[in-house]
Amino acid sequence: MTIDIRGKFVEVDSVRLGDVSVILAEGFLKKAWIYDEWYADVDDPVLFIETLKKLSPRPDLFTFIQRLPHGEPRYPYFWEPEGWAVLPVTSFDHWWKDQISDKTRNVVRKAGKKEVIIKRPEFDDAFVQGMVEIFNETPVRQGRPFWHYGKDFETVKREFSRFLYRESLIGAYYKDKLIGFIMLGHAGEYAVIGQIISKMEHRDKSPNNALMAEAVRICEEEKIPFLFYAGWDDRSLGKFKKSSGFERFDVPRYYVPLTMKGRLVLSLKLHHGVRDIIPENIQDRLRDLRNRYYSKSGRKN
């Protein structure tokens, strides 16, 4: 099957189990994982494991998560906590008064004062053209090469129309021009912020904060109890998540060895690859060096 990896579509081996696709990765350690795992439950892991053991070549390790809202481990396999950024939603009023600070409220108000209009648009050609202009504003975002930079109209339309059946669109407009948007996925008991982005030239108008407020409104309207925004982190994006009321919610990620190599790697705690070997402080320094390099490269382009 064809999947999107960091903005590029690649062909990968996979196996279909009911409504779920399992990706079979190549490499020294052959891993199997659930495609689109934020949207797919593994209700019967025994079936998955037995099916994967019959494959030739057999994957070394099968990994899957236990989705929200279930934080307590349900299955008897080795697991580790995986930190998700989650916003519990009861009502917009509760979020506005109790889950965010005065500073964040003022930032959301600032967007309105600076004439930013929030809409729920259709995925039409005008919206796609606005997406293309946002994507191609700069080759570097958050200190690294931006995945969607350089994509043309037809590519963006094709790639971002795949999941419209489960997504709501939120657009931020300034003088009738799209300056930011959210693609909000619906994943059962929670909503997923699949893409939130805005033009850097309009950062002073705080469009992302206004977009987030509208996402909370949608959750209230559709009685969705949680809003999910990828992994928890303490870097710049993490600060935005915290200021928007998100909290860390740990879900179990299971690792099931299917071969002797898989058992050995898991016993040595090397199942994350080089991340297990490099100390966290060194990883932080390497990230800073990478971000500085790409920031300089982006300014030259």
Image: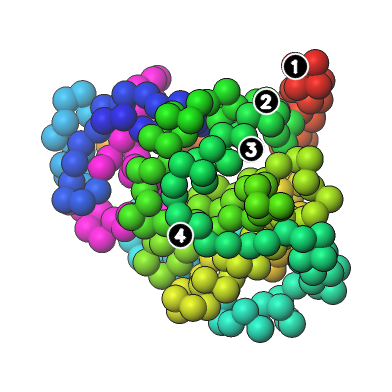
Would you say the residues marked 2 and 3 are in contact, meaning their CB atoms lie under 8 Å apart?
Answer: no
How far is mark 4 from mark 2, CA to CA?
A: 27 Å
Q: What is the magenta range? A: 21-47
Q: Which residue is mark 2?
A: 139
Would you say the residues marked 1 and 4 are in contact, meaning their CB atoms lie under 8 Å apart?
Answer: no
The amino acid beneath tag 1 is Asn
Residue 170 visible to the viewer: yes
Q: Secondary structure at mark 3?
A: helix
How packed mark 4 is, by other alpha carbons closer than 10 Å (few <14, some 14-19, many 20 or more), is many
Is 120 left or right of 24, judged from the image as shown?
right
Is 172 left or right of 109, judged from the image as shown?
left
Would you say the residues marked 1 and 2 are in contact, meaning their CB atoms lie under 8 Å apart?
Answer: yes
Q: Which residue is mark 4?
A: 168
Please tell me the numbered disc located at residue 134.
3
The amino acid beneath tag 4 is Ser
Q: Residue at x 41, y 70 (%)?
A: 189
Residue 81 visible to the viewer: no
First of labels 3, 4 by sequence position: 3
First of labels 1, 2 by sequence position: 2
Examine the image and state in which quarter residue 66 appears. Answer: bottom left
Quarter occupied by the N terminus: top left
Q: Secondary structure at mark 4?
A: strand
Q: Position of residue 92 (x, y in %)?
A: 62, 79
Asked whether 98 falls inside the magenta stretch, the response is: no
